[in-house]
Every structure is written in C-alpha cells, then in structure tokens.
Amino acid sequence: MAHDWSQRFIAAACCKVNLAGQMRAFAGCLAVIPALLLFSTASMALAQVNGPPLPRNPQGRNSALPVDPRFQRSSTGETSPRSTAIPSVGSNDPFSGEYQTLPTMELNLNEAGQREISPVSYRQIPGNSESGIPAPPGSYDETAAGDSGSILNPLSSPAPASSMNAGPWAPASPNAYLPEAAQPVWDADEPWSWHIVPEGLMYKSYIAGEKEPRMSTSWLFPTNGGQSYWDSVLGGRFGLLRYGTARGIDPEGWQWDVEGGAFLRMLPETERDVMATDYRIGTPITYREGPFQWKFGYYHISSHLGDEFILKNPTFVRRNYSRDCLVTGVGYFPVPELRTYFEVGYGFYLTDGAGPWEVQFGAEYNPPGPTGFRGAPFAACNVHLMEENDWGGSINILIGWQWRGDTSDHTFRAGFQFYNGADNQLSFLGNTTQLTGLGIRYDY
C-alpha cells in the first residue's frame, strides 16, 4: 500500500513539473506576440520608405514569350474573362499584392500566309470610333477586324519604340500606346480547372514548425552548456493534382500534395556522429481562397537512433517511437504579410510512448512578393503541445532575412533560432532542452 501511495505522489509531482513547463511555454508565446507585431509594424514602415516591392510576372521578368491564353484576346477578337475582370491597380483589395505584366509577343498570319510578330500586345481598345485614337501598328483594331476574327492587323510599320520598354521596369508614361501597367493577379473570376503536378502550394508549411518538410541546416547550442547540435532537414513537398487556378504564385482552389523528410541530428564535437533521425511522410488535401486556407491529411513519423550513438552509449534504452496521425488545420491572413494558424492532430496508431492528441498554433510575418537582392525581414513563432508530454510542449522562434524570386514562391531564409521545451528528436521523448543558434532554410 505504501508503495502504491509513493507511486501516486511521484506521478503527481511529475504532472506539476510538466504543467509548470507548459505554463512557461505558453507565457513565453504570449510575450513573443507583441514583439512580433512590433517587428511587423516596423518592417512595413521600412518597406514604405524603400518603396513598393518589385512587380511579379508569372511569365518571367521582361518575358518575350507568348503567355497563357487566359491573358490574351481570343481568336474572335473578344477579351477573355481573365482579361476583363482584372481589378485596377488602385483596387482597395488588400490581397491584390501579386503582379504580372501583360505585354508579350503575338503571332499572326497575314493574307499571304507569312508570319508576322508584334513585340507587344495591347489590351486597351484604341482604334474604334468611340476612342478617337488610331490603333498602333500591330495592335487589335476592332473597326478593321470586322467579321474576320483577326487579332492583329498586318504590320505596315515597326511597332513604337516605347513598346520595347514593356515589363516590370517600364517607365511611367501617359502615352496611350504604351502597354498597360502591372495588374494584380488575384482575380475572383479567374477560371478553375484541373492541373497535373501543378506549381505552388495552397497551404504552405509553417515557417517555425520543427517537423515540417523542407531543406535546412542549423547550428544550435544548449543554453545550459553541453555539446552543440547540427540539425538538418532533407525533405520537400509538392502538388500532384489541383482543381483551381493555373498560377503558381498564391494559387487558389483544391490541391492534393505529397510531403516527406528526414530530420537529422549530428554531434559535430564527436566526429560528427549521427545522434538520431526522425522520418516523416504524409499526404494532405489543401484548400485556399483569398485570405482563408484549410488542410486535412495523414502523416507517419518515426524515430531512429544513429548507429554511432548506439555504439558509444550501449546502456541507452532505445525507444521504438512511431505515430500515424490524421491532422487538420486552418490558416488566415488578416493582412497579406501576416498569417495566423491553428492545427490539431489525432494519432490512431501509436508505439512506445507516443500519445494520440497534438495541438499546434502560431503566427508568421512573411512579406509577399519578390524581394530582389535586397531581401526582406521575416519572423515566426510556433507552439507545439502534445498529450504524450502531459500537454507540455515547445516554442520555436525564428527571426531573420529572406529572399524570393519573381517566378515562384520558393523562399530562402537565414536567421536566428530560439527553441525551448520538449526535445524535438523523438528518440529522446521526455527530455527537455533550450537551444539558440543560427541556420538557413529553403521552403517550397
């Protein structure tokens, strides 16, 4: 009986310790949120001083290749819904932040059957009786086209020299013949269709999520001393099937993704021994429309000790941890630069200490659009609570600089990391750690 009471006393004491750790992690998260908002405000003010971000062109900077037919006039001379429904540059929609340029080359056959190319396509309508402005050579002329359905008039003279200034770097000019200015890409009337192996993701991985597939490496130091860790992730995520918009930048619709990654920890001070590796593979169904996003999926994760670590620590008890889980999450962008999210998962197949329930939530400051060589700041905070740790968990904070091109949303980041809570290598379930360090990462 006494032994029974002693066991209950020890269990109660452990619960209090775990509860205290949980409360410290939660208090730390609350303390970080005001700092994250202050950082976001200062960064947006700095962005206004430096000017707006570079316009984005899905077809590539200064592209001279034909674009998707949705951005062009049809063969009958009518403008497609994608062209007419594009909101104006002065739109009040805060999510009209992604840009593309319409100027491109067009090809047509003249009466003799010879190919003629116009260096630029015009979406304005000069040349009809209402405008009173003659159409420039090589542009669509509604009065001349008549019932022929021709897009371009035969070139009687070279296109205006100013048309060669098309693209993101085009100077501002009141000339009516100049190509149209960059237009927001987000368009509620853009048609949804089926796409195999599409470009882009509807629901991006959490920037500060410690078990999100990506490419990264970090050098971390325990704050209480001891060996440093070299943590790396070798993984990725891509779409297999989409029903939604065609664009790869901020797409909308439904998408089926596949993800996988190996989360490796090495000990650089002991011959770079592999301490442990966690493996994850999964497949989510994701959805996005405007500022809202949602996902539901399955993933498997398991832990494996490194051979060198086992040989040098023969008394260490190996844990055969694995977990098969169903997970659902929601995300919301109150402004394009800031995402908040909440996720809950339930494990239906568990081994060696794994618990069924987990909760994950956080916030990210991540300016959209291309950054150019100057880059842009970012900040992210993620809290991960798990039932297997008696609802204790971890908090992970990242602050640094990021770079993104103008043809995709893939992002390279470098910066500072702070981690506190349950050890993120599942082979050491039950341990706690506090780490600081630097790292780089590439997110899809």
Image (cartoon, rainbow, N blue to C red):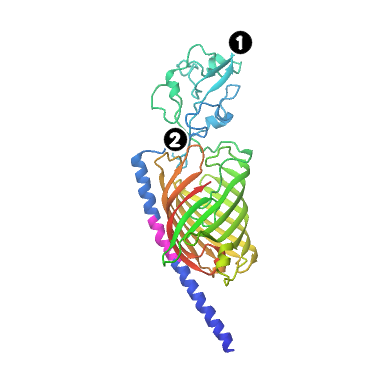
**29 in the magenta segment:** yes
Q: CA distance from mark 1 to mark 2?
A: 40 Å
Numbered disc 2: secondary structure: loop
Q: Residues within 10 Å of mark 1 (few under 14, many from 20)?
A: few
Query: At x 49% / y 62%, what residue is drawn?
Result: 270
Query: At x 49% / y 23%, what residue is drawn?
Result: 122
Closer-to-camera residue (290/38)? 38
Q: Which mark, by number, is residue 72?
A: none
Q: Is residue 25 left or right of residue 11?
A: left
Closer-to-camera residue (268/393)? 268
What kind of residue is marked 1? Ala
Numbered disc 1: secondary structure: loop
Name the quadrant of the N terminus: bottom right
Q: Which mark, by number, is residue 55?
A: 2
Query: At x 52% / y 42%, what residue is drawn?
Result: 250
Task: Pick whichever of labels 1 and 2 is earlier in the sequence.
Answer: 2
What kind of residue is marked 2? Pro
The image quadrant of residue 201 is top right
Q: Give, as a single range, the part of the protein colored magenta.
A: 25-35
Check disc 1 and report the residue beneath it: 112
User: Measured along the vertical axis of the image, is residue 121 above or below residue 351?
Assistant: above
